[in-house]
Image (cartoon, rainbow, N blue to C red):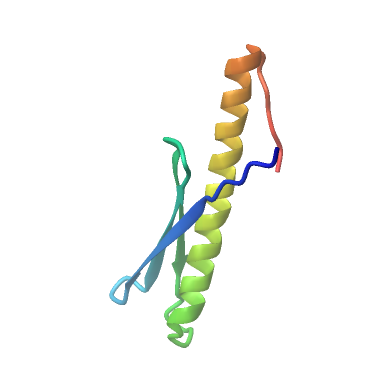
Amino acid sequence: MIASKRWSVEIFIDENDTEMTTHAEARLHTNDQTQLIGRGTARRNPKDTDIAEIGGELAVARALSDLAHELLHAAASDIEQITSEHLRLQS
C-alpha cells in the first residue's frame, strides 16, 4: 500500500526599510500536530543598492535552512523517545 501525505511550508517576509533588514519565517504545516518554524534574517549594507528581492532571497534561504535543522532535531527526538538511546542526526 502506498500512502501519500502532503506537507506545506508557508513563508512570511517582513522588510524594515529603516533598519535595512528583511526577516523571514518558514512555517511547516503537516497532517499531525507538528508545528515547526524556521527563521532567517538578511541585513543590507548601507553602501549596497536597495534591491528588496535579494534581501528576501537571503532571509528566506536562511529561514528554510533553519526549518530543516528544526525538522532534523524533531526527527532525532522522536527516534530517541522510541529507542531510549541518544541520537545525533547530521545534515
Q: Is residue 73 left or right of residue 28?
A: right
Q: Residue furthest front?
A: 1
Q: Quadrant of the C terminus?
A: top right
Residue 21 lies, in percent from the top left, at 38, 69
Q: Is residue 87 left or right of residue 35?
A: right
Asked if residue 28 is positioned above or below residue 82 in the image, the reply reads below
Asked if residue 69 is positioned above or below residue 33 in the image, the reply reads below
Asked if residue 1 is positioned above or below residue 80 in the image, the reply reads below
Q: Could you tell me which residue is drawn at 31 percent across and 77 percent down?
A: 17
Q: Residue furthest top?
A: 84
Observer-nearest residue: 66 or 30?
A: 30
Observer-nearest residue: 2 or 48?
A: 2
Residue 66 lies, in percent from the top left, at 53, 50
Q: Could you tell me which residue is drawn at 28 percent across and 75 percent down?
A: 18
Observer-nearest residue: 82 or 20?
A: 82
Number of marks: 0
Q: Residue furthest bottom?
A: 49
Q: Could you tell me which residue is drawn at 61 percent across and 16 percent down?
A: 82
Q: Could you tell me which residue is drawn at 63 percent across and 41 percent down?
A: 3
Observer-nearest residue: 43 or 70?
A: 70
Residue 47 lies, in percent from the top left, at 46, 84
